Image (cartoon, rainbow, N blue to C red):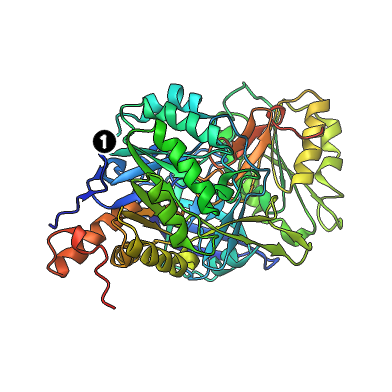
Amino acid sequence: MADLKVDLGKGLTLSNPVMTASGTFGYGTEYADFMDISRLGGIIVKGTTLHHREGNPYPRMAETPSGMLNAVGLQNKGVDYFVEKIYPDIKDTATNMIVNVSGSSVEDYVATAAKINELDSIPAIELNISCPNVKQGGMTFGTDPKVAKEVVSAVRNVYSKHLMVKLTPNVTSITDMALAVEEAGADSVSLINTLMGMAIDARTRRPVLSTVTGGLSGPCVKPVALRMVWQVSKVLSVPVVGLGGIMNATDAVEFLLAGASAVEVGTANFINPAVGEEIICGINEYLDQNGMNSVTELTGALIV
Amino acid sequence: MADLVVESLTTMPNGQYYRLILRGESPLLDCRPGQFAEVRIDQTDVLLRRPISIHFVDKERNEMWLLIQKAGKGTTALSSIQRGNRLNLVYPLGNGFNATDNDYRHPLLVGGGVGVAPLLMLGAAFRNLGVEPTFLLGARKALDLNELDEYEKFGRVFLTTEDGSLGEKGFVTQHSVLSSEKFDGVFACGPTPMMKAIAQYAASHDIPCEVSLENRMACGIGACLCCVEDTRNGHQRVCADGPVFNINDLKWQI
């Protein structure tokens, strides 16, 4: 049995490198029938905003070749509801419960992060400056290094625990974005959020999604994600969390080899609700088979 | 989540519907009428599971029946599965019909097309409660209406077809039984226009009415929020808060 522990810094230590991606795992409780969710390295709960959001109209989902588009639009009941109603139910889950914080203005991000900062059992936030499904803000914060720096710095001032920043792949230079948020005080970065795409129904001549465009995820985005994790991990000092189309342990190992210290599993949870646990076991087997003592040996071990 | 073994696959005369009978290797989990299963399709270009409503559960034989329409890539691929193959299901999902909520004495079960699927199990449940349900099943043509002997085991069966090839000609909402008898509960599953029409009938006669929705889903367990319906309580998840809704909770113009 190899050592699966990963230290992402600033108080965020994972029992293993496998976390579940925001928006794909609810608040964890939805999956408790299928696996021991406390075995996960972390659970990144549904994107939380300052105010209640109803999200986008139906239809919000389209299956595409080896992937899916979603346009949920950050439906959530707002941070106060989270603090009062959801947090008490999840705070004793024996893993890292991380809150994905989203917003449409710097003030919103700051106010939300400040409220989450008060919650003892939340060791980290994942700052979502990359959601493609909200009309204002969201992704715009993640496509301009200057704006990204501004929002991350502002949140840094009010948030004292581990600050992970989630990056969008919908940019010209992912390294410029990563360097900007690192400079602004991010303790880690996670990438990639979904790729913006669309689906059309030729029969009706209409878009499939109510919002026309949406975020693409699943196995089809993995090559793009691997490339970006590899590029970013080469230039950053802080740890990189890799995600994008991870369906099994081999995919997760590939992200670690590319330079990620930990991974997030997203779309795969929809197909196999016990996949997180299987990936943890599979990484351990890979380490044993390759005579490695610690999962940290895999990070960036790509032979080029 | 469990693997079930394919006991049989029967293609219906219209060539579009097929019935899968799946056998559990361990006792099947308890299912309520109106609940569904997320079926994994082992084909590389079909990524997501497919939500399929539970047609019937034969507890003695430890078998689950699914009635499926070849509607797209996934359900077409599934139609070539062989006896003895294993199928991975996440089940039972969703809330199901509330057959026991009220003391129904004269329930009407209305189905259209492949939407008849969950009504067989619902009819059996009413029968177990000592109530004889009335089935009103509609389709385009006679070939689309199958397994009528199965429904007749549990209640009376009335039929409509659009071309008049079986039962009364027209839509279910035009059937004479709706005006000749008084029902105290309506349970519907089928195409949305049909369900809206039947909801209108129920509302105008002041009869409680539940309908089963089939919005496109990803996870099926309430996590992804893709399948929401805009209800009087905001966006509700069809997979976890439904798929069965009371028409009073929906924003349908009826």
Quadrant of the frame with the C terminus of chain A: bottom left
Task: Look at the picture and state if B133 lies above or below B205.
Answer: below
What's the residue at 86%, 58% (across, down)? B163
What's the residue at 81%, 55% (across, down)? B166
The picture places residue A240, in percent across and down from the top left corner, at 34, 55
Quadrant of the frame with the N terminus of chain A: bottom left
Horizontally, residue B95 falls left or right of residue A286, namely right
The image quadrant that residue B13 belongs to is bottom right
Q: Is residue B234 visible?
A: yes
Secondary element under disc 1, as helix, strand or loop, is loop
Horizontally, residue A169 falls left or right of residue B203, namely left
Q: Chain of mark 1?
A: A
The picture places residue A170, in percent across and down from the top left corner, at 55, 60
Depth check: A258 or A198 in front? A258
Q: Is residue B30 visible?
A: no
Depth check: A69 or A105 in front? A105
Depth check: B240 or B36 in front? B240
Tag 1 residue: A94
Task: Look at the picture and state if A88 lies above or below A295.
Answer: above
Horizontally, residue A204 falls left or right of residue A175, namely right
Direction bottom: furthest residue: A304
Task: Look at the picture and state if A274 lies above or below A152.
Answer: below
Q: How many marks?
A: 1
The picture places residue B192, in percent across and down from the top left corner, at 74, 45
What's the residue at 68%, 43% (across, down)? A57
Give the amino acid at mark 1. Ala
Depth check: A130 or B47 in front? A130
